[in-house]
Image (cartoon, rainbow, N blue to C red):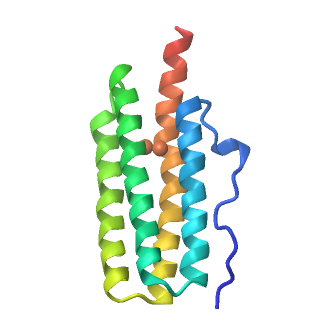
Amino acid sequence: MKIEQDPIHWKLNYNLNIEDIDFQHHFFANLINRLSKELYSSEQVEYQSALIAELNAYAIFHFISEENMMFRVDYPNLEEHKQHHLALIEQLSNEGNMFRLHPSKDKAEKIIDFLVHWFLNHTLHEDKLFADYLHSKSID
Ligand SMILES: [Fe+2]
Ligand SMILES: [Fe+2]
C-alpha cells in the first residue's frame, strides 16, 4: 500500500507574488495533503467524503476570488480561465460522488493524483499567466 506522504511539498516557485492568491493556494495544497493522508489511513468514508466536500467548497471559493480579481483588472483570458475552474469542480464532484458510493483505495489514489496534477499544472501555468499579466500592468 502507498504510504501517507504529503503529495505536495510547497516550493518557492509556486508563489505567484499575489498575496491573497498565494495564501489561498497554500491553503488548497494543505487540504490536498490532508485529504491524501486521510484517504489512505482512515476507513471512515463519511469523514473522507466530507473532506472532499471541504476541498470542493474551498476550490469554489478560491476560483470565485481569483475570477473577481481578474475581472477587476480586465484580464483578457478570464472566460477561458473560468472554463478550467469549472472543469475541476465538475470532475471533483463526480469523483467525490463515485468515491462515496463505492469507496476504494484505487479511487482514493485516482482522486489524489488528479488533484495534485491539476493543482500544479493550473497554478504553475494558467494562474502564472494571470500573475504575469497583473505584474506587467502594475509596472505600467
Ligand atoms: Fe488558483
Ligand atoms: Fe485559476
Q: Residue at x 35, y 81 (%)?
A: 100
Q: Residue at x 48, y 87 (%)?
A: 106
Q: Quadrant of the N terminus?
A: bottom right
Q: From this view, report whether residue 140 is shown above or below residue 26.
A: above
Residue 104 lies, in percent from the top left, at 45, 90
Q: From this view, report whether residue 63 is shown above or below residue 114.
A: above
Residue 95 lies, in percent from the top left, at 35, 74
Q: From this view, report whether residue 132 is shown above or below residue 63.
A: above
The answer to whether 42 appears left or right of 102 in the picture is right
Residue 89 lies, in percent from the top left, at 33, 58
Rendering quarter of residue 139: top right
Q: Is residue 124 visible?
A: no
List the single residue furthest toward the top.
Answer: 140
Rendering quarter of residue 68: top left
Residue 58 lies, in percent from the top left, at 43, 51
Q: Residue at x 72, y 43 (%)?
A: 12
Q: Residue at x 35, y 42 (%)?
A: 81
